[in-house]
Image: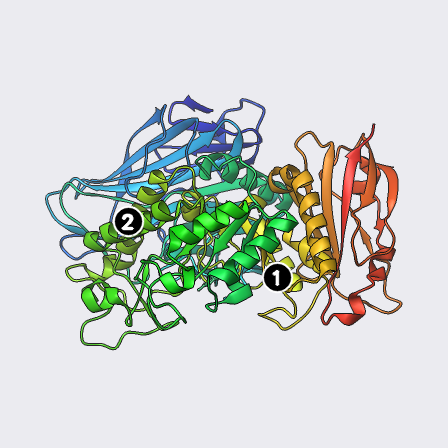
Amino acid sequence: MIRRKGQIFRLETPHTTLVIKADTAEYLYYGKKLVSSGDFEACYGLPCKLLSQFGQDDYTEPSILLENADGGCSTAFHFSRCKILAEKPEIPGLPSSYGAGKTLELKYVDVPTKVALYIYYTVFDDSDVIAVSSKLVNASKKELRVRRLASLQLDLLGDYSVVTFEGTWARERQKISRTINKGVFYNDSKKGASSHNRNPFVMAEGKDGVYAFNLVYSGNHKEIFEGCESGRMRVLTGINDFMFRWTLAPGEQFDAPEAVMCYAPDEDGISSEMHAFIGEHIVRGKWKKRERPVLVNNWEGTYFDFDEEKILSIARAAKKTGVELFVLDDGWFGNRCDDHRALGDWYDNVEKTGGGLKHLADKIREIGLDFGIWVEPEMINEDSDLFRTHPNFAMRVPGREPTRMRWQLCLNLADEKVQNYVVRVISDVIARSGASYVKWDYNRALTDPFGKGIPQGEYFHRYILGYYSIVSRITKKFPFVLFEGCAGGGGRFDLGNLCFFQQYWTSDDTDARERLKIQDGTSYGYPQTTMGAHVSACPNHQTGDSNPLETRFNIACGGVLGYELDMTKLSDEEMDVVSRQIEFYKEYRKVLQFGDFYRLGNAFGENVAGFMSVSKDKSTAIAVVTVYDYIIAGPALTVKFKGLNPSAVYEVTTREQANYKNVLSFTAGGDLLMQGNISLRDIYEDTQSWTNSKRLYARMFIFKKVK
Ligand code: DGJ
């Protein structure tokens, strides 16, 4: 809801209030919901601005930086008008949240040039997340250049720790908290993708609560935090201004991607708001609220070395265990016998598929599994028919050797011809295989951003606009298909992608111990329904470490469950364990995938960690509690559960796990389970722990409300 009194706008969400003074471009208040109806004019402290520019008396990082036709960079944007829109405006060419309540539109004009800046704030009736975006319109008669246009500026007063989610391939989104005091800190990506290294989801934590920010964008991003002498901290988020310089001709407009922000008293509150918002206002399509199938993916089971019989034998074994979907990963097309060749040749390798994709997909469906397919549409190998016929489709800088990563180049998606080509060939793959699931991979960063006729400062963003045009056309064409994004694991796990792909492959690292941290870090900003999580073989292919099959399953239940191993190699006993796991998972799938998600303990720094998913009515919950290390005669191990109904009584049992002889069972009140210290002394009784290196102890608890 948005209420107006003169130039003061009060934006109300279920638990927060944001007060904006339009004419002075100021935030008067943002935080816990205000219930009184006091007079805000009295509320002046240090001004907290929603816009900042070079050339005014403000020397902190600006939200907007333009290069005027005369080469000067000073601007003087002043208030022009404001209004409340009943509909949330779409952002041309860019994905954004949907299903909104009302939007506040603010307009500021740089009087000498007549360039207009619009800032939009959207509130949702059912969410504390506020969406913010900016747009520039060149109403002057001269060309100008945009050097920075932040999507969102928020000035905060006081001391804050900045929390980011950083890492690398196979170690994505590790939580890092730092105090910046006075000075500038930024979290960014220059890789052309949101990146494994620094996710655009960030938080500022202070004594009065937590502010969280994210960007609905999949390319280069930058989040700036500047602590000033005055005691103010400026937060900016938007497209990275690194190598960015956008020409805006008279009459043209430039749209910055949408940013989202949220206030909550603590981290759990932030996650719960972000999860609900993403589930309701970002993820879309037929799969938005549908339970996701248990899949088997052949990648780690076969890599490139497969034929029809191998694939069908895995599918038959998987079917016996209750798996519902078979995903044929990399290697089914062209001459793709390894990762040196054939990217771009999206026609069937008849030998490896035993007669073509449709033939193999039909055989899988005859076994009783749905069929899913892997593609990497944005890439090309030089050793491919596509490169031989269309070398100009590849992105490279003329006269220079391109940087090859995984022996592949990127396609020049900034070119419309290339976009149309990709839409055509990938649509054909989906149509001819009848796939009900598509894994869209992206396995390298952009190092040679170049396209004929495209100014260098526009390339990165034009690539992403091209990418969005492709994925939006393809996902619209196949509304019944479940899409899972992937970027060498979780290298492009962001809200832009989640507007098209209902889920994302979280990481190439499937080691239970490492995965616990990766999923834990991811869960701060993203719900469990968006996180692909697989049980793989041991010793683990990334770390060489081993963990019991039950432990691997427990951890994979923190996301959307899949198996990624050659199931024909499982012993009868293991097949039995997997069958029981899948039976259990299907029984509790709704709670696990769509319940309210909580982190337990602390995966980054304490011995006890885990997660918990609670049904909306709080009658059922599943928790996975983990202990990293066996400390001889160490401190008592305890956990506090979360999200239960404090006044209800629960029957608590542990899942029957092949690696624990005993099953725990007791009844306890919700309040005790959440406020007390529940002992985990039995967790070291894992009968398989000694045969496994770097083991993680993990038990699953089931809660059923009995009173
Ligand atoms: C990287 C992905 O993350 C893997 O799961 C797999 O699909 C490979 N690419 C295939 O090349």
Residue 637 or residue 415, whichever sits in front: 415
The answer to whether residue 328 is seen in the rendering is yes
In the rendered view, tell whether residue 581 sits above or below residue 19. below
- State how far apart marks 2 and 1 are (Cα): 36 Å
Taking the image as drawn, is residue 235 in sight?
no
Q: Is residue 409 above or below residue 589?
A: below
Residue 423 circle label: 2
Q: Amino acid at mark 2?
A: Val
Q: How far across and down, in percent of the image, does residue 45 sit?
A: 49, 40
| Residue drawn where x is 16% and y is 39% of the image | 139
10 Å crowding of disc 1: few (<14), some (14-19), many (20+): some
The coloring applied to the image is: rainbow
| Residue 162 position (above or below residue 396) | above
Residue designated by label 1: 568
Q: Residues within 10 Å of mark 2 (few under 14, many from 20)?
A: some
**x, y percentage for residue 338?**
41, 71
Tell me: 158 left or right of 240.
Answer: right
Look at the image and tell me in which quarter the C terminus lies. top right
- Looking at the rendered structure, the secondary structure element under dot 2 is helix
- Residue 448 appears at what percent x and percent y? 28, 68
Could you tell me which residue is drawn at 78 percent across and 39 percent down?
A: 703
